[in-house]
Amino acid sequence: MTKHSEPGNASHSHQPALHDKVDIQFMADANGHSRSLMEGFDPKFADFVDYIIRITHEIWEEKAIGKLYDYYANTIQIHTSDGTIHGRDAVLAGTIATLAAYPDRRLYGDEVIWGGDDQVGLYSSHRITHKGTNRGWSLYGPPTGKTINYRAIADCLCKRNMVIEEWLIRDELTLVRQLGLDPVQTAINMARKQAEKGGFPDVAGDIERGIGQLPPAIIAPSETFEPENFVRRAIHEVWNWRLLNKVRDYFAETVTLESASMRRLSGHNDYQAYVLSLLSPFPDLAVTVEHFCCTGDAAQGYRTATRWRMKGTHTGYGIYGEPTGKRINILGVSQHLIKDEKIHNEWTLFDEFALLKQLHRPT
């Protein structure tokens, strides 16, 4: 897909606190912006943020599953770290299966960051908290009666009242643990089944941070502060250049990070340790930015969403155990709150269970 980097033209007039949820009953008060840039969308939606929040509520909480025919294109593609789901019927089947497994499922909207326009396409990055009880069969087996509470981020490209493409990242490893399952053994079992059914997304090809013997490219700073340039440089210099000292340049001293598997960290030292925990098992790790969007301004703070992909080879020791020599190809999203030209809050998500399955896939 062509990269979109247009800044959004609206954001919540009420900015949620770190763990605040936007109650669906108060969306009009929380949002309250005009319907500009909404050509082709149902007039019942106040604006694009309202559209994203409400269609999620209708489909999942009101259980109007058939609304997928109204809101999802027949040719929809949903990209995950496990591969790509093709077509609306597959989305319908997956939605029914998930609601059968968690009949009381609730999806709380934590943040919607957006960009684009109604001609090229409106792009949203929707951070969601999932809660529910496992009362039915799921892909993990019979009902456990366990309560689940985990985060997901759905990036959607929308046009004329329909989602035409989606990138979905769930904290699946937290879900597996909350169901009471052993993560590694479950990953081994499911990787074997996944390989039998058609395999894994492509994890081959070069992993390049630079070309040949050359170091990674340099991203020059913009003449004046520009959020996209700032975030791209932060990711590139810290992750691809391994300049962990740059954490102090890009992040506030009191930075807080919420990441996959319920990681909650604060401060420069914790952030550097987090980076090292992923670089150690994957010494050749490369992070590539695929999409960026932003809302807000310098006065109220910028809220940004950056979709990225990380590739690497498991040749080092660390949190994933004995090196397997396997390649990984994982999709992720980072949302940031930037104030006074520093990142104060980061919410990063990638599917760590998909990563485990790639490490334990049959050779």
Image (cartoon, rainbow, N blue to C red):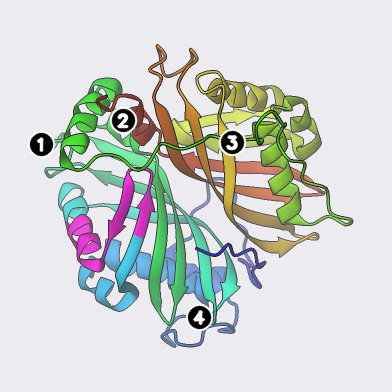
- 332, 255: nearer the viewer: 332
Q: Quadrant of residue 295?
A: bottom right
Q: CA distance from mark 3 to mark 2?
A: 23 Å
Q: Quadrant of residue 3?
A: bottom right
Tag 3 residue:
208
x and y, in percent, of residue 105 in the image: 27, 52
Q: Quadrant of residue 35?
A: bottom right
Q: Earlier in the sequence, mark 1 or mark 2?
A: 1
Query: Magenta residues?
Result: 78-96
Nearer mark to the viewer, of 1 and 2: 2
Q: Earlier in the sequence, mark 3 or mark 2?
A: 3
**Lateral position of residue 260 relative to residue 345, left or right:** left
Q: CA distance from mark 4 to mark 2?
A: 41 Å
Label 4 environment density (alpha carbons within 10 Å; few <14, some 14–19, many ≥20): some
Nearer mark to the viewer, of 4 and 1: 1
Q: CA distance from mark 4 to mark 1?
A: 41 Å
Tag 2 residue:
357
Q: CA distance from mark 3 to mark 1?
A: 43 Å
What residue is at 74 percent from the left and 27 percent from the top?
A: 243
Q: Earlier in the sequence, mark 3 or mark 4?
A: 4
What residue is at 77 percent from the left and 50 percent from the top?
A: 339
Tag 1 residue:
142
Under mark 4, the amino acid is Ala
Residue 46's disc number? 4
Nearer mark to the viewer, of 3 and 2: 3
Under mark 1, the amino acid is Pro
